[in-house]
Amino acid sequence: MNILILTGAGISAESGVPTFRDANGLWEGHRFEDVATPQAFRRNPSLVHHFYNQRRRSLLDVRIQPNPAHRALAEFEAEHRGGFLLVTQNIDDLHVRAGSKNVLAMHGELLKARCETTEEIFPWRDDLDETTTNPNHPEFIGTMRPHVVWFGEMPLGLARIEEAARNADLFIAIGTSAVVYPAAGIVRQTKPTCRKIEINLDATPNSSEFDQSIRGKASIEVPAFLKSLASG
Ligand code: NAD
Ligand code: APR
């Protein structure tokens, strides 16, 4: 059986990482046009760096740890005989820290930085600013940016995601508001026989596309659902 999982900010909410669109979400204090577009970066790089520096520092706080939903997915993958791909819209590293192996971070990774000149990608834990240099090319000053996908840019791994969607026998969307495309369209790329499950606190615009919508906290519902699959 081929399994495709899609996760969003909701799966990391109980780990202490703020979501985007819930009350107190990240977009409440910011207009995404000001901090999460290539135009914003050109216009005001220090504001964009500041936004991501804060998020990176928060993620590195020792209290931010994978929760039972991340761990259950990693344990399930380790036991599963068959295809498995975990596509995440999250830029945190909690799936990887929980032990998941086949993870595709379609909106990039906060703990990486990329040189706009050479396209090299580096693991990154420090703040970035307009004076940061490419570690391999100190002559390139101010060319480093967070390795994240901004609005208006192409998400990563789309061909692989499309193939996994076409071949999936089971698709599970967890903790995503289903308003940002192309992630929100993956459910419609699956074949008619694919079983489709949504796990979310609330209904989403996509809920009617799923065979079953499970309402509840990811930390409870994800382990419970995966256990029910494993036992039969
Ligand atoms: P868009 O112009 O916002 O994005 C274009 C492309 O950028 C999409 O393919 C998207 O996948 C990609 N993208 C780039 N950075 C992204 C990121 N950080 N997260 C997710 N995707 C990213 O158009 P869209 O994808 O059609 O936007 C979906 C809807 O969400 C729109 O109605 C948009 O106005 C709305 N939106 C709302 C907020 C908010 O909550 N304040 C933020 C962003 C977008
Ligand atoms: N358990 C399950 N679901 C939850 C929980 C929880 N503990 N907490 C919140 N949720 C649900 C909310 O009901 C909401 O539907 O998670 C969803 C979070 O939605 P968003 O904040 O919109 O996050 P996401 O869907 O990942 O956003 C998509 O938008 O701005 C971009 O780059 C950003 O990748 C992100 C993309």
Image (cartoon, rainbow, N blue to C red):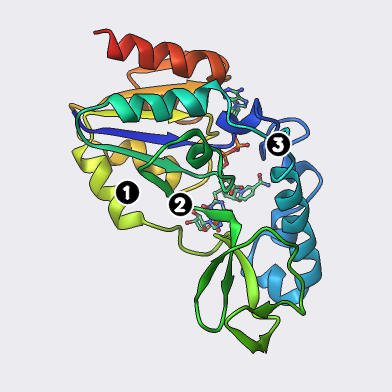
Q: Residue at x 59, y 36 (%)?
A: 9
Q: Earlier in the sequence, mark 1 or mark 3?
A: 3
Query: Which residue shows up at 54% across the image and 59% down it?
Result: 149
For marks 1 and 3, give the CA distance.
25 Å
Name the residue carrying label 2.
106
Single out the residue that lies furthest toward the bottom. 139
Q: Quadrant of the C terminus?
A: top left
Q: Which of 124 and 33 is in front in this view?
A: 124
72 relative to 56 in the view: left or right: left
The percent position of residue 183, horizontal first and vertical second, equals: 44, 45
Quarter occupied by residue 140: bottom right
**Helix, strand or loop under label 2:** loop
Q: Which residue is drawn at 44% across and 22% down?
A: 72
Q: Which amino acid does label 2 sit on?
A: Met
In the image, taking residue 225 as reference, residue 38 lies left or right, namely: right
Mark closest to the chain's N terminus, 2 or 1: 2
Task: Name the kind of residue labelled 3 in the image.
Answer: Pro
Label 1: how many Cα within 10 Å (few below 14, some 14–19, many 20+): many
Residue at x-position 33% and y-position 30%: 77
Q: Looking at the rendered structure, which numbered label has been put on residue 194?
A: none
> Circle 3 is placed at which residue position?
18
